[in-house]
Image (cartoon, helix red, strand yellow):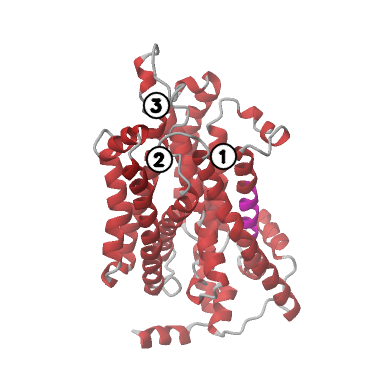
Amino acid sequence: MNDNIKSKETTLSFEKIKQDILRPMQNHKGLELWIVFLVTVIAVCGWAYYVQLRDGLGVTGMRDYVSWGLYIANFVFFVAVSLVGMLISSILGLLRVDWITPISRIAEIIAVAFVAVAGLVIVLDMGRPDRVLNVLIHGRFQSPILWDVTVITTYLVISALLLILPMIPDLAICKKEIKNASPILKKVYNILSFGYTNTPEQHKHLHKMIRTLMVLIVPVGLAIHTVTSWLFAATLRNGWDTTIFGPYFVAGAFVAGSAALVIALYFFRVNYKLQDYITELHFDKMGKLMVAVCLVYLYFNVNEFLVPGYKMKSGDSIHLRELFFGSWAIMFWSSQLFGNILPIVLMVNKRFRMPKPMMIISIFVIASAWFKRYVIVIPTMLHPHLPVQNVPDHFKHYFPSSIEISVTVLSFALALLIITVLAKIFPVVPMCEIADQKGIDYKIEE
């Protein structure tokens, strides 16, 4: 098998690399139909948000007691998936792990799309989105919400820079090689390539900037999910009142983000015909990485419930019984089994670290990750400290309305649209970095 891999590498030339990676950008009718479908979904679901904006949050299932519902669960999920950019491009990149080269750009595309939509989901959760600027104008430093807005914005900016800067040499090639690009797109390539010609001085400065950003994004990436966890943990509610939520959320984010990346890798490998670049080796390595992060996440899951279960305070007792044996038991145990335990058991076996098995496992992992966020948010809201009395019965329960479900579909469709558009106009696999890694000479004409 190693001999086959070596023979493939030796037959690669820079012309072949350019042809393989640029071809899907120029002619991929299936991708264009997918974009049309996503735009249609966004337009239809956008009507649901208009109804919410017109009539207020009363059209949702949220009430006085469950004031955080489906939207906040979505927010935590989107923030979690976005951390894959920091994990792959920065942590593994700073450790000089060479196998991430062909997949790091896809990780950054996912990070940019999901963190951008995460910020938008917060606006969708507001009854008066016209007042969103008040968070910045009149925000108080004591408020974790201000911290959250700050780190999300910072993470988005750095992630966008980490996507664009390593792409500069490739964009210098795109403006010459993609003949059928629209005048606007050619202008974009010309602006974002910054006149790059791959001189030794340019190469040195570019890589210095990239490594600086790789260092900066690590604390920001850790902060974005830590601060999100503090929005919960800073309260006294049973189920949230814990000191481990910071690292617990970060570990869960690495699991969800890795699963999203594996699904994207499989899609681009098959539909873009990039089997020579996104190889079985990458799925094998991602499987091993997912086992590692799942084990860490499993530890925090055990710790999250063992400590309050051992002390069994009255409020914790009600909360844990509802999760383990009550109305939330099926969702809770399914998320633990399919999102953590079974993936670890399966992925330690090499046969399940192949492309298709990894993709199937990752679909279950990412779906379980979403349900886990739902379980984190909603049950705790249903167990208030003060007695619930003299209110309508439906105030004591929560189920998302059709409006909430439609707006949720809107947010997912928007994230997928951003990924699709970026994959349509930019190379998803770095051409010049692969050439550098394989020792292939290339020139970039001015």
Q: CA distance from mark 2 to mark 3?
A: 19 Å
- State the mark number for residue 401: 3
Residue 171, visible in the rendered structure: no
Per the image, the residue denoted by label 1 is 120
Of the residues tagged 2 and 3, which is closer to the observer? 2
Q: Nearer the viewer, residue 409 or 162?
A: 162
Image position of 77 with respect to 27: above or below: above
Give yes or no for contact between labels 2 and 1 (Cβ–Cβ under 8 Å): no
Secondary structure under the numbered disc 3 in the rendered image: loop
Question: Image quadrant of residue 296?
Answer: bottom left
Residue type for callout 3: Ser
Q: Residue 138: horizontal and vertical position, in percent?
A: 71, 32
Between 154 and 197, the one lying in front of the other is 154
* Whether residue 381 is visible: yes
Nearer to us: label 2 or label 1: 2
At 44% from the left and 51% from the top, the residue drawn is 248
Q: Amino acid at mark 2?
A: Ile
Q: Quadrant of the N terminus?
A: bottom left
First along the sequence among labels 2 and 3: 2
Image quarter hosting the C terminus: bottom right
At 61% across and 59% down in the image, what residue appears?
217
Q: Nearer the viewer, residue 33 or 226?
A: 226
Residue 215 percent location from the top left of the image? 63, 65
Query: Residue under circle 2?
Result: 376
Q: Which numbered disc, 2 or 1, marks the residue that appears first in the sequence?
A: 1
Residue 416 screen position, x and y as percent:
48, 48
Magenta range: 153-161
Q: In the image, is residue 160 part of the stretch drawn in magenta?
A: yes
Look at the picture and state if 85 lies above or below 401.
below
